[in-house]
Amino acid sequence: MRDQKMREYMKAYEAQQKQLQSLKKSGKSSKQANEEIKSRLQNKQNKATKSKKTSAAMGDEEAEPPAELLQKMKEYNVKFAFPDPPKLPPPVLGLHSVSFGYKDQELFKNLDFGVDMDSRIAIVGPNGVGKSTLLKLLCGKLEPQEGEMRKHRQLRIGWFDQHANEALNQEQSPIEYLGLKFQIEYQDARKRLGTVGLPGHTHTVKIKDLSGGQKSRVALAELALGAPDILIMDEPTNNLDIESIHALAEAVEAFGGGVVMVTHDERLIRETNCQLWIVEDHNVAEIDGDFDEYRKEILEQLGETLTPPQP
């Protein structure tokens, strides 16, 4: 959807540029041509405003055309890269005879689940069965009520979730935040922020003034600088645009350590070649078959028609 909107925007921009060139060839100055196009746009907007109520009543309301000239969309590259970790011998990380639940809901009972350096796991299952809780138990954010979490003494876990933005120091700029936390030089911090697609003018702006997507890029830069051995990610794509999702998938696929994620992003699961494990019956089990078979089974349970994923 976003790619389609970008194409439509560029088509409108190119058409507007042709109009400007035509006006300039007729003898108008750049300023006069710009003002005439703006006047035309304003007239369209006025007409749209008058017909807005009618369109809304017909259920066919459209966005009003802009009264300003369209600006050329800036192209940018996004690249996430995680350094390859040393190969730690197994067992690396595991839950042993773990039980956990909340007041009126038992989530896990005698759970045994392990992750090694070559693991590629996507946790799936219905909402409310404990997928996010499982990740928090794995990385030590929650303590088992019974059993234990064990990890290699040298293991570094990289945690990233949809709330990672909130953990950033909102009063610091991205450069200050990374520089102070990892003791890196100013230019190195700028380079890393530029690599993850953060515009240069935002590098020195307070994090609290950045958009959600921009904050997520700062958090991903932080994740990479932490040099994790295993990535544990809970809905990592929620605040990312299409370019960033592609870049994250490529980075995860190229990563030399273990990966465990919870995500509803079908493309991320496919592109990272994750094995599917399902949370059910207070436990976790590997699914026999691929993503398409699981997807079809779930839709059949819901009584829905299978629709192939969009390319």
Image: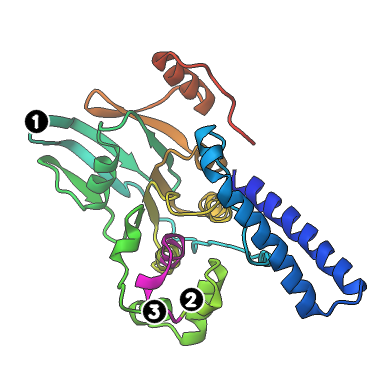
Mark 2 or 1: in front is 2
Q: Is residue 247 above or below residue 193?
A: above
Residue marked by disc 3: 173
Percent x, y for residue 212? 41, 60
Question: Which mark, residue 202?
Answer: 2
- Chain-order first, disc 3 or disc 2: 3
**Residue 177 in view in this figure:** yes
Residue at 56% from the left image edge and 38% from the top image edge: 55
Residue 309, compared with residue 147, is above or below; it is: above
Q: Nearer the viewer, residue 23 or 7?
A: 23
Q: Residues within 10 Å of mark 2 (few under 14, many from 20)?
A: some
Cα separation between marks 2 and 1: 46 Å
The residue drawn where x is 50% and y is 34% is 57
Q: Nearer the viewer, residue 209 or 303?
A: 209
For the point 41% across and 25% down, the residue is: 287
* Secondary element at image label 1: loop
Judging by the rendered image, the residue that carries numbered circle 1 is 104
Colouring rule applied to residues = rainbow
Res. 272 in view = no
Callout 2–callout 1 Cβ contact below 8 Å: no
Binning the other alpha carbons within 10 Å of mark 1 as few (below 14), some (14 to 19) or many (20 upward) gives few
- Circles 1 and 3, Cβ within 8 Å, touching? The answer is no
Q: Nearer the viewer, residue 37 or 199?
A: 37
